[in-house]
Image: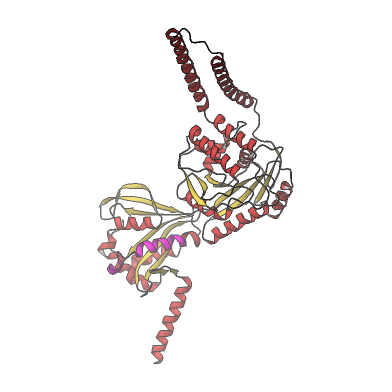
Amino acid sequence: MQQEMGTGQREERDRQQEAAVRIEGEKVFLRPMEEQDTGNIVRWRNSSRVRCCFIYREDFTPESHQKWTDTMIHTGRAIQFILCEKESRRPVGSVYFRDIDDKKQEAEYGIFIGEESAAGRGYGSEAARLAVEYAFKQLGLEKVVLRVFTDNIPAIKSYEKAGFVKEGILKAVECSDGERKDMFFMSVEREKEKLISFVIPCYRSASTLTGVVAEIKGSMELLQKEGKLYSYEVILVNDSSPDDTFAVIRGLCREDEKIRGINLAKNFGQHAALMAGFRFVRGDIVVCLDDDGQTPADEVGKLLAAIEEGQDVVYAKYEHKKHSLFRNFGTYMNEEMAKVMLGKPKDLYVSSYFAARRFVIEDMKKYTNAYPYVIGLVLRTTHKISNVTVAHREREVGVSGYTFRKLLGLWFNGFTAFSVKPLRIATAIGCTCSAIGFLYGIYTIVKKLVNPNVPLGFSSLMAAIVFMGGMTMIMLGLVGEYVGRMYISMNNSPQYVIRETVNGEER
């Protein structure tokens, strides 16, 4: 009885020691290799199923294993684990890292499933995932590589499930028995923390801005708790607001160094303020949203997820907008203008709440003319644009800063700054009016020849003159608008002028 209890105590002690150091998975766990594992390793390595997966195919002996232990394990050039079934705790194989390079922060991964009954049960995929996680978190490596024969399809699929990707192919690698076979060189790199830059144009938002920033902080902290490797910065651009908006920005910057403030010298408009903010971003992904709290910062995860899935730009789409009827009409007009003049896809909804990859922002920054239009800049940069649905909130404080004049100016700016279609439309209208006038002239002559008594009408003549004159003035005005914008751009009129900044320099 005492002997039985002693054995149980030893097993419990061994179990506790293993639990302290072992790497747990769902089906398997990895524990450090011990001296008593030599027999299993020698037996596994000499099996024909395992031997054919190695370049070195000579008989593996206890002396071979001891040499490996002395020259690799004890010197720190390698780390080896025993792969065990979680339920039975039975050793079924081995996992190792070799040629660990502290300078490059890199190592080569290897695995073999020794027990025939353990093959094909998904142990290799899970072991590779656990080992890679250990390499990045505990060993501090940045990259793990491996070599695998190209005909070892199950192993390749197993590695790919763990995140390994093929980097190249090693042709005709010679094995110790003289056979030559091709090998894939595969690797997986540690996922690096991504910086998210929030850019917010601010106008009459002294009472709402603190809440918006707090919501951004809360959202990012929640994403970090979910395991997302995100850090963030917030760039607040005061578009010469007449209230105390910049004083609020100063206070937020004093409280948190992640927040940076930009104060423009005069009111340049929302799109110019965004361009000013873009000059200061450092993030891998840039998120733009409003300062009034209507755009839900707590749903930024949806935009970021779509970017991570491969999109270059993601716009928030609202099922039920809480804007006024006037503002919704202005938005509708801009949407239709973008479809006709800028080639915006019909199923794409654009809004002021969007996320974009850094390269898109960098390309937008190359536009230095005085009339920036963010939607036009996005559409000319990439076609990988999509929507995600988010909630739209009621405005709690104040009214929209977009007046009818500003909305009209934004609409006019959009189609004159990024499209020549209005000029082509003007040409088509001119040709149509000329054709109508010519046909009407022929009609008048024929009518007079058929009935000489028909009087020539003064009113119809004046109507034609007024119509043609009006169309001519519209076309001249449109051409003049283009010429005027060219003149202003040639004089290097600035998109914006920065009066001062808080917490940072322009990038």
Quadrant location, the C terminus: top right
Residue occupying the point 52% across, 54% down:
301
Residue 457, given in percent of the width and then of the height, sits at 53, 13
Compare residues 325 and 442 and report the one nearer the observer.
Answer: 442
Compare residues 331 and 254 and report the one nearer the observer.
Answer: 331
Residue 80, given in percent of the width and then of the height, sits at 41, 65
Residue 488, given in percent of the width and then of the height, sits at 64, 26
Quadrant location, the N terminus: bottom left
Q: Does residue 378 lie above or below 487 as drawn? A: below
Asked if the stretch drawn in magenta spans residue 171, the answer is no
Furthest residue to the bottom? 1
Compare residues 444 and 367 and report the one nearer the observer.
Answer: 444
Dominant SS in magenta: helix
Please name the colour scheme applied to the rendered image. Answer: secondary structure
Asked if the stretch drawn in magenta spans residue 130, the answer is yes
Q: Quadrant of residue 59?
A: bottom left
Compare residues 102 and 477 and report the one nearer the observer.
Answer: 477
Q: Would residue 143 be seen by someone viewing this image from the given angle?
A: yes
Residue occupying the point 64% across, 28% down:
492
Q: Is residue 261 left or right of residue 482?
A: right
Q: Does residue 355 lie above or below 363 as drawn? A: below
Q: Would residue 76 be seen by someone viewing this image from the given angle?
A: no
Residue 104, given in percent of the width and then of the height, sits at 49, 52
Magenta highlight range:
115-133
The number of numbered discs placed on residues in the rendered structure image is: 0
